[in-house]
Amino acid sequence: MILVNRLKHPVKIVQDNRTIIIPPSGKVARVKTQQKVIRHISFGDIEIPIVINDVIEIKGLPPVCANCRKTCKHDDGRMTCHMQEPKVYYIVSTFVAKMLHRRRDLIAPDTSPESAIRQNGRIVAVKRLQSWYHP
Protein backbone atom coordinates (compact mmCIF):
# COMPACT_ATOMS: atom_id res chain seq x y z
CA MET A 1 0.00 0.00 0.00
CA ILE A 2 1.15 3.52 -0.78
CA LEU A 3 0.17 6.66 1.15
CA VAL A 4 0.45 9.97 -0.71
CA ASN A 5 0.07 13.11 1.39
CA ARG A 6 -1.87 15.75 -0.57
CA LEU A 7 -1.89 18.21 2.34
CA LYS A 8 0.55 21.12 2.63
CA HIS A 9 1.99 19.82 5.92
CA PRO A 10 3.42 16.49 7.11
CA VAL A 11 1.03 13.95 8.66
CA LYS A 12 2.28 12.29 11.84
CA ILE A 13 0.61 9.03 12.88
CA VAL A 14 1.31 7.36 16.24
CA GLN A 15 0.37 3.70 16.76
CA ASP A 16 1.63 1.21 19.37
CA ASN A 17 4.50 3.50 20.47
CA ARG A 18 5.64 3.82 16.85
CA THR A 19 5.53 6.98 14.79
CA ILE A 20 5.40 7.47 11.05
CA ILE A 21 5.63 10.82 9.33
CA ILE A 22 4.24 11.16 5.82
CA PRO A 23 5.77 14.21 4.15
CA PRO A 24 3.74 16.39 1.79
CA SER A 25 3.94 15.31 -1.85
CA GLY A 26 4.17 18.85 -3.17
CA LYS A 27 0.64 18.76 -4.59
CA VAL A 28 -2.32 19.87 -2.48
CA ALA A 29 -5.78 18.43 -3.11
CA ARG A 30 -8.48 21.07 -3.38
CA VAL A 31 -12.11 21.21 -4.38
CA LYS A 32 -13.96 24.27 -5.58
CA THR A 33 -17.63 24.29 -4.68
CA GLN A 34 -20.67 26.25 -5.70
CA GLN A 35 -23.50 26.72 -3.24
CA LYS A 36 -27.06 26.20 -4.38
CA VAL A 37 -30.12 27.10 -2.32
CA ILE A 38 -32.35 24.03 -2.11
CA ARG A 39 -35.04 25.36 0.23
CA HIS A 40 -35.81 27.83 2.98
CA ILE A 41 -37.00 27.25 6.53
CA SER A 42 -39.05 29.68 8.54
CA PHE A 43 -37.98 30.61 12.04
CA GLY A 44 -40.28 33.24 13.45
CA ASP A 45 -40.41 35.98 10.84
CA ILE A 46 -37.08 35.01 9.26
CA GLU A 47 -36.63 32.84 6.15
CA ILE A 48 -33.33 30.97 6.43
CA PRO A 49 -31.84 29.53 3.21
CA ILE A 50 -30.55 25.94 3.21
CA VAL A 51 -27.77 25.32 0.69
CA ILE A 52 -25.87 22.36 -0.70
CA ASN A 53 -22.31 22.48 -1.99
CA ASP A 54 -21.79 21.13 -5.50
CA VAL A 55 -18.22 20.28 -6.49
CA ILE A 56 -17.36 22.19 -9.66
CA GLU A 57 -13.58 21.71 -9.81
CA ILE A 58 -11.02 19.24 -8.40
CA LYS A 59 -7.30 20.03 -8.24
CA GLY A 60 -4.30 18.04 -7.04
CA LEU A 61 -5.83 14.56 -7.46
CA PRO A 62 -5.65 12.05 -10.30
CA PRO A 63 -8.80 11.09 -12.25
CA VAL A 64 -11.03 8.26 -11.07
CA CYS A 65 -12.06 5.17 -13.02
CA ALA A 66 -15.83 4.87 -13.47
CA ASN A 67 -15.63 1.08 -13.03
CA CYS A 68 -13.62 0.65 -9.84
CA ARG A 69 -13.83 4.23 -8.51
CA LYS A 70 -10.11 4.10 -7.84
CA THR A 71 -7.34 6.19 -9.31
CA CYS A 72 -6.39 5.06 -12.78
CA LYS A 73 -3.52 5.86 -15.08
CA HIS A 74 -3.55 6.99 -18.69
CA ASP A 75 -2.27 4.38 -21.13
CA ASP A 76 -2.20 5.37 -24.82
CA GLY A 77 -4.91 7.95 -24.21
CA ARG A 78 -7.25 5.44 -22.54
CA MET A 79 -8.11 5.03 -18.89
CA THR A 80 -6.72 1.77 -17.52
CA CYS A 81 -8.06 0.38 -14.28
CA HIS A 82 -5.22 -0.40 -11.89
CA MET A 83 -7.00 -2.86 -9.61
CA GLN A 84 -4.06 -5.30 -9.91
CA GLU A 85 -1.55 -2.65 -8.85
CA PRO A 86 -0.84 -1.76 -5.19
CA LYS A 87 -3.50 0.36 -3.54
CA VAL A 88 -2.74 4.05 -3.34
CA TYR A 89 -4.45 6.18 -0.71
CA TYR A 90 -4.37 9.98 -0.85
CA ILE A 91 -4.33 11.83 2.46
CA VAL A 92 -6.47 14.93 1.99
CA SER A 93 -8.32 17.43 4.15
CA THR A 94 -11.55 16.42 5.84
CA PHE A 95 -13.44 18.83 3.58
CA VAL A 96 -12.03 17.28 0.40
CA ALA A 97 -12.72 13.72 1.65
CA LYS A 98 -16.29 14.61 2.57
CA MET A 99 -17.01 16.40 -0.70
CA LEU A 100 -15.59 13.50 -2.74
CA HIS A 101 -17.12 10.72 -0.62
CA ARG A 102 -17.54 8.41 -3.62
CA ARG A 103 -13.77 7.99 -3.84
CA ARG A 104 -12.52 5.09 -1.75
CA ASP A 105 -8.90 6.18 -2.22
CA LEU A 106 -9.29 9.39 -0.15
CA ILE A 107 -8.57 9.43 3.59
CA ALA A 108 -8.03 12.24 6.09
CA PRO A 109 -6.37 12.58 9.49
CA ASP A 110 -8.87 11.80 12.24
CA THR A 111 -8.74 14.88 14.44
CA SER A 112 -11.49 13.73 16.82
CA PRO A 113 -10.72 13.89 20.56
CA GLU A 114 -10.16 10.11 20.64
CA SER A 115 -7.50 10.26 17.91
CA ALA A 116 -5.81 13.67 18.05
CA ILE A 117 -2.60 14.06 20.03
CA ARG A 118 -2.21 17.65 21.23
CA GLN A 119 0.65 19.71 22.59
CA ASN A 120 -0.09 23.19 23.90
CA GLY A 121 -3.57 22.96 22.40
CA ARG A 122 -2.34 22.18 18.86
CA ILE A 123 -2.76 18.86 17.06
CA VAL A 124 0.71 17.43 16.47
CA ALA A 125 -0.24 13.85 15.51
CA VAL A 126 -3.18 11.48 15.09
CA LYS A 127 -3.73 7.86 16.02
CA ARG A 128 -5.75 6.99 12.94
CA LEU A 129 -7.06 8.10 9.57
CA GLN A 130 -10.69 8.32 8.46
CA SER A 131 -12.80 7.90 5.35
CA TRP A 132 -16.20 9.07 4.16
CA TYR A 133 -16.42 6.63 1.26
CA HIS A 134 -20.01 5.70 0.37
CA PRO A 135 -20.61 3.74 -2.83
Image: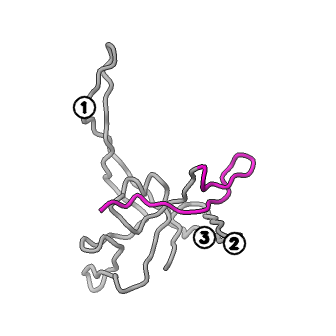
Q: Is residue 14 above or below residue 38?
A: below
Disc on res. 70: none
Identify which amino acid the numbered label 2 is placed on.
Arg
Mark 1 or 2, closer to the camera:
2
Mark 3 or 2, closer to the camera:
2
x 29%, y 25%: residue: 41
Disc on res. 18: 2
Q: Residues within 10 Å of mark 2 (few under 14, many from 20)?
A: few
Between 55 and 44, the one lying in front of the other is 44
Asked if residue 111 lies left or right of residue 43, the reply is right
The image position of residue 129, as x and y in percent, is: 53, 62
Identify which amino acid the numbered label 1 is placed on.
Arg
Specify start and end residues of the magenta stretch as a single range.
113-135
The alpha-carbon separation of the residues under discs 3 and 1 comes to 42 Å
* Residue furthest right in the image: 120
Mark 3, residue position: 22
The image position of residue 47, as x and y in percent, is: 30, 21
- How is colour applied across the structure in the image? one colour
Mark 1, residue position: 39
Q: Secondary structure at mark 2?
A: strand
Q: Secondary structure at mark 3?
A: strand
Q: Tell whether position 100 is magenta.
A: no
Rendering quarter of residue 19: bottom right
